[in-house]
Image (cartoon, rainbow, N blue to C red):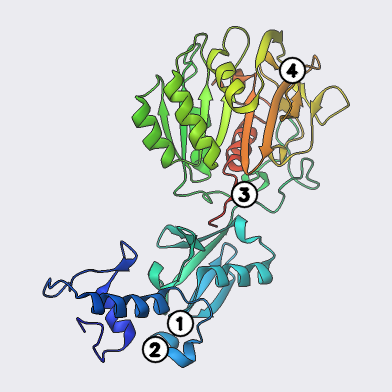
Amino acid sequence: RTTATTTTPALGLTQCLWDSHARAPRTSCPACTRALAPAELAALAAIAHTCFDVSGLDPAAFLPLPDIDAGAFAVSLMDGTRYSFPITHAARVRDVKEALMASTGIDVRLQRLMHNGTEIKAHRDGQPTLLWACGVRPGHVLQLIAVYGAHAGKGEIQGAARDRSGNAQGSQYDLGVDQAFVGLQIAVLHLYTGEGFDFRHPEAAMRSKGFTVRRWTMPPAPAELDAALAQSCQLWVVSNRSVLLNDEHRRIIQQHYQRGIGVYIWGDNYPLYADANELGKHLLSTTMTGNVLGNKTVGPWTGSIGFRPHLIMTGISRLFEGHSVATIQPGPYIEPLVNGSEGNLVVATYNREGRRAVIDGGFTRMYPSLWDDAGTARYVINAAVWLTNMENRLDW
């Protein structure tokens, strides 16, 4: 059992000598700590490769595993429907997710397959992930979460009850499903806290979908920001009247943005867009300017005013534009989303080359005193969901 020449079945050998944390063969015996000879390591590597990189493998010709093959595990959907799958040493997460897509129509990238509260993905470090390596055993029940709700992309939802602003009432009409984003973190650089702006309402809205929130009211040390963004799916930046982020902060933000985390850049009327403009130039080739008194509610696009169809506008028939707002300047890559009551561009999006961002000139929408105005809570939720960038993730 402690050498690669043992007659112990290969699974027993890999259980003994395969380091599941490092995902590589051990270099010494865990029982006696004896260093393995080169010949032993070579033989073990061949067996471990066969067990864990199962491309082209015929399981029946390789290794009988009655204790695994005799069992099955189940996947439970949020509506209670269950699908059963046999589990073998070769069973891959990818195969299960593709089978679920065939049965449910839910795109593999919009599925979160949860095991004991942790998402298991089809790939890790570019390699297929095996269910057995993720701890899935016969009799286990996994949960399948479809991250988008049934009404994704629909602004006007027929038959829905309405709130006082005319928007569909109920979280089932949000873009994202409640608690579908457990385990995902949103980092927030909340650099303007004047006028009672404490971020409690946006944070509560994010948490309703399962997100955790890490927030700073002053820029952290660059190393701290770097470590936090490495664990985050997106960053929200609320700008102040003067530049508070330095070149190193911006370099770190750009680096994580390039690898695929979402970014929401918030400014407001002059001069509350200092950092918004620095980031806007670096990431999106655009800025914002000016001071337009909005304080009105807009509806679907009329040709000069209102919002275009978009996943962020799911379940929104009316949207408060903000009290006083800045105007987003045209850019080569951004797409207009919301034009205010004066026809000025208030919100634009970026969705290219696997990256997503939003730039917005009206952060007063998130003020506690204005939070209950038309569509704000749903808009914030939908933006956070869209910025998870699920459709573009490669590991799914």
Q: Quadrant of the C terminus?
A: bottom right
Q: CA distance from mark 4 to mark 2?
A: 67 Å
Residue at mark 3: 392
Which label's residue is closer to the chain start, 1 or 4? 1
Q: Amino acid at mark 4?
A: Lys
Which label's residue is closer to the chain start, 2 or 1? 2
Number of residue marks: 4
Q: Position of residue 75 (x, y in %)?
A: 52, 71
Image point 62% across, 61% down: which residue?
108
Horizontal relation, residue 23 to residue 240: left or right: left
Q: CA distance from mark 2 to mark 3?
A: 37 Å
Image point 57% across, 51% down: which residue?
393
Which label's residue is closer to the chain start, 4 or 2? 2
Residue at mark 4: 296
Horizontal relation, residue 280 to residue 192: left or right: right
Q: Position of residue 95 (x, y in %)?
A: 57, 72
Image point 34% across, 65% down: which residue?
23
Residue at mark 2: 65
